[in-house]
Image: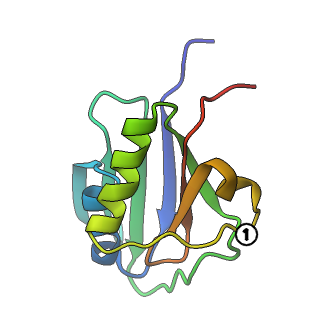
Amino acid sequence: MNAATLRIARPSDDIEALVPFYRDGLGFDVLYRFADHDGFDGIMLGSRGAPYHLEFTKAHGHAAGRAPTQENLLIFYLPDLPDWQAAVDRMEAVGYSPVPAFNAYWDRHGRTFEDPDGYRIVLQNSAWGI
């Protein structure tokens, strides 16, 4: 199978509150926006050319609510220490402080941040490997 492109889609009650977290904090680009597409507004964020992006949608007349648990994670592996530190510094510079990870494993070599909807991302200072 050829490498797939991954889209992670998630509902939100306030898309605009998420933009600073993912654009300014994580450094993602706004790839696309749409309004009132069959009752949905949305935004796609990611790094241009990367094989993944995030889509956040708001369904008109529907409440999405917050993350169901603190263990709903997206993990970004940044093995190079200066790159990892720059990513952590960027999140903190725009006002997002690390939170204790629900699973302490992620605190050993990473920092966890919670977005305005309660979903969490981990900036992990290690290489991906299975």
Q: Residue at x 43, y 29 (%)?
A: 51
User: Can residue 65 be seen?
Assistant: yes
Q: Residue at x 55, y 58 (%)?
A: 111
Secondary structure of residue under mark 1: loop
Residue picked out by circle 1: 102
Residue 123 against residue 117 in the figure, above or below: above
Q: Residue at x 27, y 74 (%)?
A: 16
Side of 4 relative to 104 (left or right): left
The scheme the figure's colours follow is: rainbow
Name the foreground residue: 104 vs 21: 104
Give residue 91's position: percent from left, percent from top: 35, 62
**Quadrant that contains the C terminus:** top right
Q: Check disc 1 and give the amino acid type.
A: Phe
Residue 34 against residue 114 in the figure, above or below: above
**Quadrant that contains the N terminus:** top right
Q: Residue at x 38, y 37 (%)?
A: 82
- Mark 1 is surrounded, within 10 Å at the Cα level, by few (under 14), some (14 to 19) or many (20 or more) other residues, namely few
User: Can residue 19 be seen?
Assistant: no
Name the foreground residue: 57 vs 99: 99
Give residue 38's position: percent from left, percent from top: 35, 66
Give residue 93's position: percent from left, percent from top: 27, 66
